[in-house]
Amino acid sequence: MSFQYPLRNFSMGASLSSTPEKIPDDFLTSTTPQNTVTCVYRAYVAGYWRNLTVFWCKNHSNHTLNLIITNLEGEVCYNCRVDLKPWFFWSKKGSKSFELGGCQVDLHWDFRSAKFSGSPEPASDYYVAVVSDEEIVLLLGDYKKKACKRANARPPLVEAILYLKKEHVYHKKTFSTRAKFDEKKHEHDIIVESSTRGPRDPEMWISIDGIIMIHVRNLQWKFRGNQTVMLSRQPVQVSWDVHDWLFTAPWHRPWLVHVQTRGFGIGR
């Protein structure tokens, strides 16, 4: 299953379509089923707005975090990998320093107490911090005070904006995630469920905050579609493509659910 929701558009010379998320090469060439979470942020790093792709990946033998920094034209400026399932002589806490545009940038992380709930991305008790000019320009996780102390840096003057999140999950008929469609509002619970067995025709349900917003019957005929629903007086567009999941071989059965809201411009 593939689930993605663009959260923001920008007015800084590049759009979502012109700056797609960057994926590590080893994932693209791998034949092993992998659960992944891709988050793309826009942050002010080393004097410029840049895209930061945070790629969480887990399979039967590896569990990794990849950080890929690109300019707004999509050119890769920096790429590194952190193992969340390291060998016994490696630590789940660490840091790296690198140069970007003549400026030093630091990456700090701590996964020693991280808790997971079925996703490659930790649910709690961790931090990942990117520091530029003594400022934390990207801060992930709930250990914010520990991150600031470890990095010896001030909180961001302008917080990084998450504008795309994509999740790939294998071998599940029910998928759940959380998404924030407005920076000023709370996260929403999103659940996608399907039924393909039994006497009834295939069906799919998409729920937000426990309320079924979309129910697709006769999925074998309506395997592609879109619908706009209202969430807290805000229009949310939901589209889906489950053709390959229904009609291809079991090993290659991806399907896509896409949720988005209207974007807006930002500046600094």
Image (cartoon, rainbow, N blue to C red):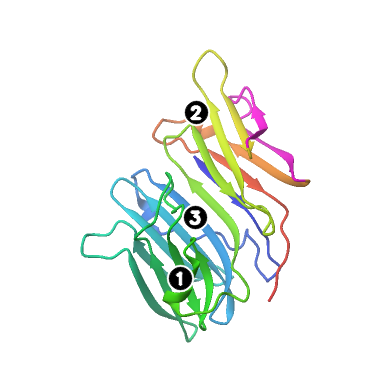
What secondary structure is the stretch in magenta mostly built from? strand
Task: Using residue 30 as the reference point, say whether residue 197 is left or right of it.
Answer: right
**Which amino acid type is marked by label 2?**
Phe
Task: Choose mark 2 or mark 1, whichever is in front.
Answer: 1
Task: Using residue 27 as the reference point, say whether residue 86 is left or right of it.
Answer: left
Q: How many marks?
A: 3
Residue at disc 2, secondary structure: helix
Residue 264 location (% of width, % of height) = 73, 61
Counting residues from the N terminus, which is met first, the one under dot 3 or under dot 1? 3
Q: Which residues are magenta?
A: 210-232
Residue at x 39%, y 78% (from the top left corner): 97
Residue 267 location (% of width, % of height) = 70, 73
Counting residues from the N terminus, which is met first, the one under dot 2 or under dot 1? 1
Question: To which residue does mark 3 refer?
Answer: 38
Relative to residue 118, is residue 103 depicted above or below?
below
Task: Using residue 48 as the reference point, say whether residue 153 is left or right of it.
Answer: left
Q: Work out which residue is located at the far bottom of the displayed protein and give it.
A: 102
Question: To which residue does mark 2 refer?
Answer: 247
Question: To which residue does mark 1 refer?
Answer: 147
Cα–Cα span, label 2 and label 1? 47 Å
Cα–Cα span, label 3 and label 1? 22 Å
Counting residues from the N terminus, which is met first, the one under dot 2 or under dot 3? 3
Residues 86 and 241: in front is 86
